[in-house]
Amino acid sequence: MPPRGEYSQRRRRLAAELERRKLDAVIVTALPNIRYLSGFTGSNAALLATAAGDAVLFTDPRYQIQAADEADCRVRVVKGSLLKALLETARRKGLCRLGFEAQRLSFAEHEMLRAGLWLGAWLEPQTGLIEDLRMVKSPAELEAIRGAMQIASRAFCEALCIARPGVLEIELAAEIEYRMRRLGAEKPAFDSIVLGGARTALPHARAGREPLRANELVLVDVGAVKAGYSSDMTRMAFLGRPDERVKRLYEAVREAQQAALEAVRPGLAADVVDRAARRLLAGHGLERAFVHSTGHGLGLEIHEAPRLGKGERLRLAAGMVVTVEPGAYLEGFGGVRIEDTIVVTSNGCEILTPASKELLAL
C-alpha cells in the first residue's frame, strides 16, 4: 500500500486540476478512483473532493471500522443514500460548480444528483479527471505491480507441470489461480484465459471444458492482484514438437513484440508503439491477423489509460505502466500472443515480466 501521505499528495494534484477546470469540487463514484484518492477499499462509497484540497468519504455502517482504519480523509457514515448526503455536504460548504465522472456515473445516479441541486449549483461532466492522474505510477505503486507480476509469472511456470494432453483448459486455469493465491495474490486480475488448439485464435475467449490435445498450441493469459494493483502476461506453449508453420507464426509475433518494446520512449505518442508492431507483422503478411491494440495501461484496474493503439496521440511518460501484447490469429489453425507488463523509463522501458518468452515445448 502507498504511504498514507501519498493520498493527500494525490488530492492536492487533483485540487490543482479542479482549479484549472474552474470547478469547486468533484463527485467521485468509481471505486478505483476513491481508493486512489483516499485509501478506502470497501465496495460502497462516494467521495467529495474539493478545489481546496480537502475530501469527505461517504460510506455505510458496514464499513465504519474499515473506513476509519484505511481512509486518511474525513469519513461520514451514512444510513441511506450516499449521494444525497454528499450533496447536502456540498450545499453546506457553498460548493456550486460540481464535476462528476461522466463515464462512471449511471443515468439514474445522475438524475438523482440533478434533482437534488440547489439554486446556483450545477453539474459538469468530466472525463479522465482522475484517471489521467493515475497514469504515472509512484514508487509504491510500481512495487505493488512488480510483486503482482512476480506472483503471476511464478504461478504460471509452476502450473505447467500439469499441462498435458487431456487436461481441461479450465483445470489449468484453476491450477494457475490456486498457485497465485498460495503465492500471495489477493485474487486473479481477471478471468484467466487458457486456450488450446484452434481456440487460441480467439483473443479473449474464456477457459472452457475443452481438453488440451497433443501437437497443438496452448495460450495462457493471466494476471494477479497484489495490494490492489494488477499484472498481466501472456505466454505460449506447444504440446509436442511444433512444426514449421507454428514456429514461423510464433517468431513473427515475437519479432513484432520486440519492435514494439524498442519503440517505447517517453515523449512519443502511444500509437508509435502500435505502428511498430503492425509494421513488423505486415512484413510477414499478418497485418489482418492482428485484431486488437498493442497494449493498455494497468494499475488499480486491469485496463486503464494509456492505450497503445491506432490514433492514440497521448504522449508516453516515465512511470507509466502498460502491456505490450501483439498477436496474430488464424481462424481454424490457432493464434499467438506474447505479452509483457512494462514500465516506461527515462530512456526506454523495463520489462516487469520475468517468465521466459520462448515457445515452450511440453
Image (cartoon, rainbow, N blue to C red):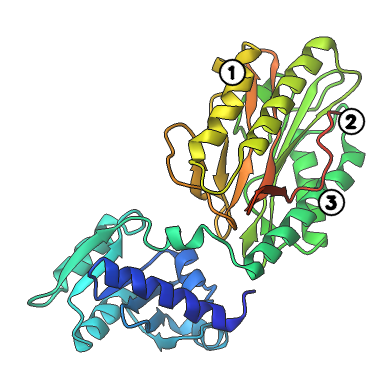
What's under tag 2, amino acid-wise? Arg
- Residue located beneath label 3 in the image: 154
- Residue located beneath label 1 in the image: 289
Label 1 crowd bin: few (<14), some (14–19), many (20+), radius 10 Å: some
- In contact (CB < 8 Å): disc 2 and disc 3: no
Query: Can you name the residue that lies furthest to the front here?
Result: 347
Q: Which mark is residue 321?
A: none
- Residue located beneath label 2 in the image: 164
Return the residue nearer the eye: 187 or 311: 311
Tag nearer the camera, 2 or 3 = 3
Residue in the image at 45% along x and 63% along y: 133
The reply, left or right, for residue 119 in relation to residue 285 is: left
State the SS at label 3. Answer: helix
Residue in the image at 51% along x and 42% along y: 268
Label 2 crowd bin: few (<14), some (14–19), many (20+), radius 10 Å: some
Residue in the image at 28% along x and 68% along y: 20
Label 3 crowd bin: few (<14), some (14–19), many (20+), radius 10 Å: some
Query: Can you name the residue that lies furthest to the left here?
Result: 119
Q: Position of residue 109 (x, y in %)?
A: 27, 63
Residue 89 visible to the viewer: yes
What's under tag 3, amino acid-wise? Arg
Q: Earlier in the sequence, mark 1 or mark 2?
A: 2
Q: Earlier in the sequence, mark 1 or mark 3?
A: 3
Residue in the image at 67% along x and 30% along y: 259
Return the residue nearer the eye: 184 or 97: 97
